[in-house]
Amino acid sequence: MEVRGGGGGRSGRAEHEHNIDIIIVGGGICGLATALAFHRKGIEKVVVLEKSEKLRATGAGIITQANGWRALDQLGVAAKLRQTAVPIPNMDGEMRCLKRADLMQALADDLPPNTLRFGRTVLGIKVDPCTSYPTVHLDDGTVLHAKVVIGCDGINSEVANFLGMNSTRIFSTCVVRGFTSYPSGHKFENKFVTFSKGDVQLGILPVNRNLVYWFITRRWTSQDSVVSNDPKLIIQSSIKALSGFPEEEVEMVRNGDLDQLFLNQLRYRTPWNLLLKRRFGEGSVIVAGDAMHAMGPFIAQGGAAALEDAVVLARCFAETIGGIGIHDQISHKEWRMRIAMAIHKYEKERKMRVVKLSAQTFLIGKILDSSWLPLKLIWIALMVILFRRPHSHTLYDCGQL
């Protein structure tokens, strides 16, 4: 079975592939984690479709707190990843900053051969009128037939579009993320430090003794759509934004690794849309990760929530399917009923968790966005009322896989 994009359908004759049970759209953190979780539960015939030609880690570092590490323990990759990042002293449990590339590679390394297919762009999803199962249509003309499709394809999710989910919204805040390497070792303390001035915030977190992760949040400007495509311009704009900040920290940003710089405007789904939406799936199509609950990075929970999704989703399927290897012995009707039960259990378990995370990040984003003081004070008051324990989200346990 090939693992890269093929030619086939461009002549006008579509190629069909049927020997797949579960298709995961998107080979980022959520997609890889979900595939690995299914594999750990013995659910095979799973394929991950990734449009890039290789693993692509957008966002440099990922701050992983206690709840994220619980999920990584369940996925069986935590021990390996703990060797790549130093622990950060924290009253709310384990915290480390991982390189996204390390996290994605650790997840991918434990997948069965040919699970991950690169260079596959999904154009759309349809429902087979004969079986009521979904079909995934690729840009090379290939049509993949599966029993389940899981959208882990991020904020611009093709699967979410199929499900009719509302488009993500945009904060007026953006974030610059990067690494700075210190071959002889850095002098920063082994702790999470932030500096603020006006509407600019700088956060610093060591990954290990030779690498420091940093991020800057600031207002998005009309020039940033151009700046975001040029690492040197990202550095220049970041230095300008950090005027008046401590010189050692500014020098750190000035020496940032140019091949690991990212500037992104922040997108989110409103918490009320998540709360009021009855279902996050239709038939045997479901979403997870940013495709379901895109949120700002302000409490460092986007990646951890995706890992939690993966554990819960695989557990729900394993509980209701009871061994996907026996699927040939049950009818299409019975199979669809079991899939529906699994998706319902997943939605029920995850809904209020992601609503709360989304609400907290939404309020912080609005506090940062608001330039009119009375409105900012309203957002702050709501934050204090609704989230008296602002770090309680790290206490969450996704449970055993």
Image: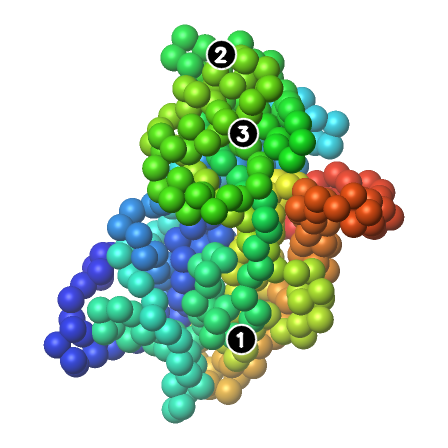
- Residue drawn at the location 37% of the way across and 74% of the way down: 124
- Residue drawn at the location 50% of the way across and 58% of the way down: 155
Q: Amino acid at mark 2?
A: His
Residue 396: where, in percent of width, then height?
71, 46
Residue 272: where, in percent of width, then height?
71, 65
Compare marks 2 and 1 and give the one earlier in the sequence. Answer: 1
Q: Amino acid at mark 3?
A: Ala
Say left or right for 13 vs 318.
Answer: left
Disc 3 packing (10 Å; few <14; some 14–19; many ≥20): many
Residue 223: where, in percent of width, then height?
44, 43
| Residue 260 sits above or below residue 354 on the image | above
Q: Secondary structure at mark 3?
A: helix
Q: Amino acid at mark 1?
A: Gly
Residue topped by disc 2: 186
- Residue drawn at the location 23% of the way across and 74% of the way down: 141
Residue topped by disc 1: 164
Disc 2 to disc 1, how far (Cα)? 48 Å
| Residue 392 sits above or below residue 3 on the image | above
Q: Are marks 2 and 1 in contact (CB under 8 Å)?
A: no
Compare marks 3 and 1 and give the one earlier in the sequence. Answer: 1
Tell me, for residue 44, which label it has, or none: none
